[in-house]
Image: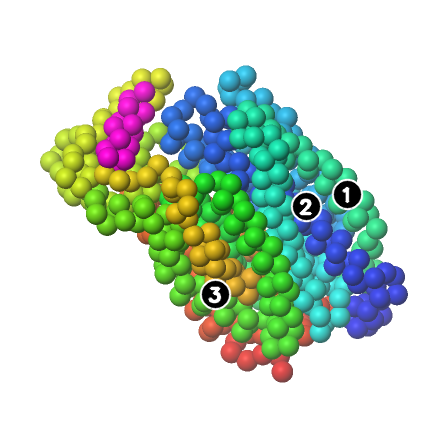
Amino acid sequence: MTATTAETAPKREGSMALVVSAAAAGTAFEWYDFFIYAPLTAIMSKVFFAGLDESTAYIMALGAFSVGFGFRPVGALLFGRIGDRIGRKATFLITMAMMGLSTTAIGLLPSYNTTHLAPLMLLGLRIMQGLALGGEWGGAAIYIVEHVDKKKRGVSASWLGCSAAFGLAGATAVVLMFRNLLGEETFAAWGWRLPFLFSLVLLAISIWIRLQLHESPVFAKMKSEGKRSERPYAESFMPGPNLKRVLLALFGIMIAQGAVWYAVFFYATTFLEQTVKIPPATLNTITLALAMASVPCYVIAGWVSDKIGRKPVMLFGIVLTLIAYFPAFHMLEQVGNPVLFEAQRKSPVTVIADPADCSFQFDPVGKTQFKTSCDIAKSTLAKAGVNYANQAAAAGSVAQIKIGEAMVASVDASKLEGAPLNAAKKDASAAITKALRAAGYPEKAPPGTTNAWAVFLTLFVLMIGATSLYGPQAAALVELFPARVRYTALSLPYHIGTGWVGGFLPATAFAIVTATGNIFNGLWYPLAFTAIAAVVMALFFKETRGRDLAAESDVLPIGPEGPG
């Protein structure tokens, strides 16, 4: 059987629409499971980390969210090897079951007030979700691209980008629905569990859909000819052409993907809720609209990449976002909460503290308690969405916060633990917050002041960049690697980029903001990764469009010229 025959055989076995829709739908359900945590972070902090002060509890809840991302590369290695040895279909059935059951279990967890083991249980289930997602995306991407005609790989695989949008939109819509049905008080008390429990229904549907599928023709041919890799790890990551492909995928595509996509769809949301103080219901509506508007953009980007190539479309997305980061986030503050913007202009804030008293508050797992007077002052201001300058004070002095013409003292709680620590931090935060309110800093965006359309259109510009990168990405990655190690070699850079670069973006950005005092400086984190990828892709990435997926050649598709 020729490679061409292998690629076209499924047209006799079943519909290409079934292949694409089944793979994409299953992936959408997994994204729903993984993303459902994000719009519930504030509630999860109170349910599972109730023993801590509000700021620390929220950071720990973000840390629990990040843990899932941290384990995605581990899942990529584990399930990538299984996918290259036993097949694409069986592997993503396993990952789907893991994800659905883990998500459902979160909805059944006891709270911290019931057992102090609740946070550990939550972390364990987030780890299971991260492992499952680490094996899912690569399998779905490979399954689609190995089935479809080479002239339609970009547009067909772009539906995986849509699946992420559907998953995010579905998670946001379900949360919004239950919030409106139950009311905020009931939803916060127990209704938050319902979106997690709903995953059991999605699991049953997605498994039924995927059981209708056949194995990938490229893998089936490779298996029948005895050409499966016996050592996927060694073939993928030992020095040689495949390792170069892995590094190219990581530094030319995936670090940008992690930075761009999560900056647009997650960090922007965190920024608007925690810094700009847009009400959650308004923000959920905007996020839902943005996710749905992104769907045709993924497909268009994939379709264009089938016509002109993967590289120019992805590079356009990277460069657009690189240019737009800072102007867009400045605009989000101005149109999202103009009262906050005006207060920062009229009553600037300065933290006067001993530099040795100030930590870089990077805590992706939420275990560190920042207790010095400087750390308490800065974390309070960062949580309030306030820009501030830094001024050095005498060694050993307690930090002071200057708000306009008013002065407020922080508190040194470095020798306290437990309840006394929480009380001291709460009192200091309350005093700083009172002074901010007196200076005109709002607790949240006042009703009627948020220009929701302007917020949406600003995010839309960023979204065009994200979808231009993500739309052709699946086809490009599958075409980049040889069939023997495709699952293993593709999955690892994908999940390092999205899991580590993207997953740790909120925690790292928060740390940068608290260290510098500028609410926009957290953007330097995604901007740095995006810039590196722009250079690597422009100089070293060779066009992959039209490559023979069954080829075993070690010729590396790197360089300024395409395949012709």
* Observer able to see residue 473: no
The answer to whether marks 2 and 1 mark residues whose Cβ atoms lie closer than 8 Å is yes
- Viewer-side residue, 211 vs 293: 293
* Observer able to see residue 155: yes
The residue carrying mark 1 is: 205
Disc 2 is placed on an element classified as helix
Boundaries of the magenta span: 423-438
Q: Note whether 412 is above or below 247 in the view shown.
A: above
Disc 1 is placed on an element classified as helix
Image x and y of residue 200, in percent: 72, 35
Image x and y of residue 164, in percent: 61, 52
Q: Earlier in the sequence, mark 2 or mark 1?
A: 2
User: What residue is rendered at 31% in x and 45% in y?
Assistant: 340
The residue carrying mark 2 is: 29
Whole-number angstrom distance, CA of label 2 to CA of label 3: 27 Å
Image x and y of residue 61, in percent: 47, 34
The residue carrying mark 3 is: 318
Quadrant occupied by the C terminus: bottom right
